[in-house]
Image: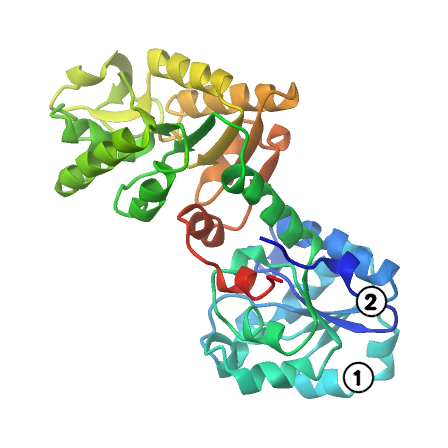
C-alpha cells in the first residue's frame, strides 16, 4: 500500500484543507483531554513550515446534519489554539471560508464549523465535497480515527483535490502496516474485552495472520465455557459457544496458537474491596465470577511476549478499572513495554478501552505506537478496507 504524504505535494502559498479529529471530551465548556488536539500539531506545523495555510475540517458529536449549539466547534477553538501555540480563527459558515475576513487571513489556522452540521457530510455527497474543494488547493487527511466512515470530508473530497496523508495518519498507517502488513515474526495478538460477539470479525482475521493469540477479559469466559468449563456467574455469552469453537478450529488449521487463562481470579461481585481468590480455570464456583487472569496465566502471557517480535494489543485482560482485577493487564502491559523499550518488540495497541488500560498500567508511553482511533483501528485489524485510507492510495 502506498499513499502520498505532505512531503510529496507543493504547499507554498496553498490552502490545505486538513481533515482532523478534534472530537474531544468536554465538561462545563472546557476540554478535559487534550490528546487529540496535541496529536495534530505535527501536521499543522509541517503545513505552515512549508508555506501552506491550514484550514481545518472536523466534526464534533453526532448532530445528524443539523445545527446543534452544544456541538459547535467554537467551544473547542480556544483549547486548540493553546495546543497548537498558534492563532486560530473560527469560521462559522462555509461562506465565511469562501470570503475570509482580514482577521481570518491574518490567522495561522482556520477552523471550520462542525462539518456534520451539513447533511451532505455523512451522505458522502459529491456535490457537497465539490463545494468544500473550492475552499482550498490541497486535501490532507489527518483523521485516521474517522477513516472508516465514507463521508464527504474523509472520502469524496479526496477525489476533487490533490490528496495526501497528514503526519498522524502517516504514523497510524505505518504502525499498522508494520503490525499486520509485513510484520517481523512471531506475531502475538492480545485481545480482551467483554464480548466475543463484538469481535467476531477481528478474531476471524487475526487467527489467520498471527502466530499466537491471547484471549482475555469477559471474552475468555465464553471460550472457557465453550470447552465445557464452569464459569459460575461470570460475564459469558453462552450462545456464542459454537462460534468460539469454530474460531479455535480455524486457529488450529492456520497454525495459530490460542492462549486462554489456566488460572483465574474470582469474586462474588465486581466491587472495590471484595474478597478475591485465585484458582484453576476449571474450578470456578457456581456463585463466583471470573474477573481477571491468574498469576500462572500471566506467566504464560509474558513468556509469549518474550517469544514475539511483534505485538498487537486490543482490550484488557480483566476488569482493570477495579483493583485487584487490574493485576494481569498491568503485569502483561508493563512486560510488553519493557521488551519494547529494550528493542526486542514492536508493539502496537488501540481500540476500545485499550488506551485507558495501558495508561492505567503506566505502560502506554513505552509502546511503539498507541492508536486513539477506536473503531477505525478495529476495522483495520478486522481486515476491512477503510474508505478514508483507500481514497489516499496511489
Of residues 108 and 123, the one nearer the viewer is 123
Relative horizontal placement of residue 305, taking residue 223 as reference (left or right): right
Relative horizontal placement of residue 379, taking residue 1 as reference (left or right): left
Position of residue 2 measured from the top left corner of the image (x, y, whole percent): 62, 55
Residue topped by disc 1: 100
Q: Sequence-wise, which precedes: disc 1 or disc 2?
A: 2
Position of residue 369 measured from the top left corner of the image (x, y, whole percent): 60, 38
Residue at left offset 40%, top offset 12% = 299
The vertical placement of 101 against 198, above or below, is below
Residue at left offset 20%, top offset 27% = 224
Residue 58 can be seen in this image: yes
Write down the quadrant of residue 385 in the picture: bottom left
The vertical placement of 177 against 101, above or below, is above
Residue topped by disc 2: 10
Of residues 232 and 152, the one nearer the viewer is 152
Residue at left offset 78%, top offset 57% = 7
Residue 183 disc label? none
Identify the colour scheme used: rainbow
Position of residue 36 measured from the top left corner of the image (x, y, whole percent): 63, 52
Write down the quadrant of residue 97 in the picture: bottom right
Q: CA distance from mark 1 to mark 2?
A: 22 Å
Residue 321 can be seen in this image: no
Amino acid at each position: 500500500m502506498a499513499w502520498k504524504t505532505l512531503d510529496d505535494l507543493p504547499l507554498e502559498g496553498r490552502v490545505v484543507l486538513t481533515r482532523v479529529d478534534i472530537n474531544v471530551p468536554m465538561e462545563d465548556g472546557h476540554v478535559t483531554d487534550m490528546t487529540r488536539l496535541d496529536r495534530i500539531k505535527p501536521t499543522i506545523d509541517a503545513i505552515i513550515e512549508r508555506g501552506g495555510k491550514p484550514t481545518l475540517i472536523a466534526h464534533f458529536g453526532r448532530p445528524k446534519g443539523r445545527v446543534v449549539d452544544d456541538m459547535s466547534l467554537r467551544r473547542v477553538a480556544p483549547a486548540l489554539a493553546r495546543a497548537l501555540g498558534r492563532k486560530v480563527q473560527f469560521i462559522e459558515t462555509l461562506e465565511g471560508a469562501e470570503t475570509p475576513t482580514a482577521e481570518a487571513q491574518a490567522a495561522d489556522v482556520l477552523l471550520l464549523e462542525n462539518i456534520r452540521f451539513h447533511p451532505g457530510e455523512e451522505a458522502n455527497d459529491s456535490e457537497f465535497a465539490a463545494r468544500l474543494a473550492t475552499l482550498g488547493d490541497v486535501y490532507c487527511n489527518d483523521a485516521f480515527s474517522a477513516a472508516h466512515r465514507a463521508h464527504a470530508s474523509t472520502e469524496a473530497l479526496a477525489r476533487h483535490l490533490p490528496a495526501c496523508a497528514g503526519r498522524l495518519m502517516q504514523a497510524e498507517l505505518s504502525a499498522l502496516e508494520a503490525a499486520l502488513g509485513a510484520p517481523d515474526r512471531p506475531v502475538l495478538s492480545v485481545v480482551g474485552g467483554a464480548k466475543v460477539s463484538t469481535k467476531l470479525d477481528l478474531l476471524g482475521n487475526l487467527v489467520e495472520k498471527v502466530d499466537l493469540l491471547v484471549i482475555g477479559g469477559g471474552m475468555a469466559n465464553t471460550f472457557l465455557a465453550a470447552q465445557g468449563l464452569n464459569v459460575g456467574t461470570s460475564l459469558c455469552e453462552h450462545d456464542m459457544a459454537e462460534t468460539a469453537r469454530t474460531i479455535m478450529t480455524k486457529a488450529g488449521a492456520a497454525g495459530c496458537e490460542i492462549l486462554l487463562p489456566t488460572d483465574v481470579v474470582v469474586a462474588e461481585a465486581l466491587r472495590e474491596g471484595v474478597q478475591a481468590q485465585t484458582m484453576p480455570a476449571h474450578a470456578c464456583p457456581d456463585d463466583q465470577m471470573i474477573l481477571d487472569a491468574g498469576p500462572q496465566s500471566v506467566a504464560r502471557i509474558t513468556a509469549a511476549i518474550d517469544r514475539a517480535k511483534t505485538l498487537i494489543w486490543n482490550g484488557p485482560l480483566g476488569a482493570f478499572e477495579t483493583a485487584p482485577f487490574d493485576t494481569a493487564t498491568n503485569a502483561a502491559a508493563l512486560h510488553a513495554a519493557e521488551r519494547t523499550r529494550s528493542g526486542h518488540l514492536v508493539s502496537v495497541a488501540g481500540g476500545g478501552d485499550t488506551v485507558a488500560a495501558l495508561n492505567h498500567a503506566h505502560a502506554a508511553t513505552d509502546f511503539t505506537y498507541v492508536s486513539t482511533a477506536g473503531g477505525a483501528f478495529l476495522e483495520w485489524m478486522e481486515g476491512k478496507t477503510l474508505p478514508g485510507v483507500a481514497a489516499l492510495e496511489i
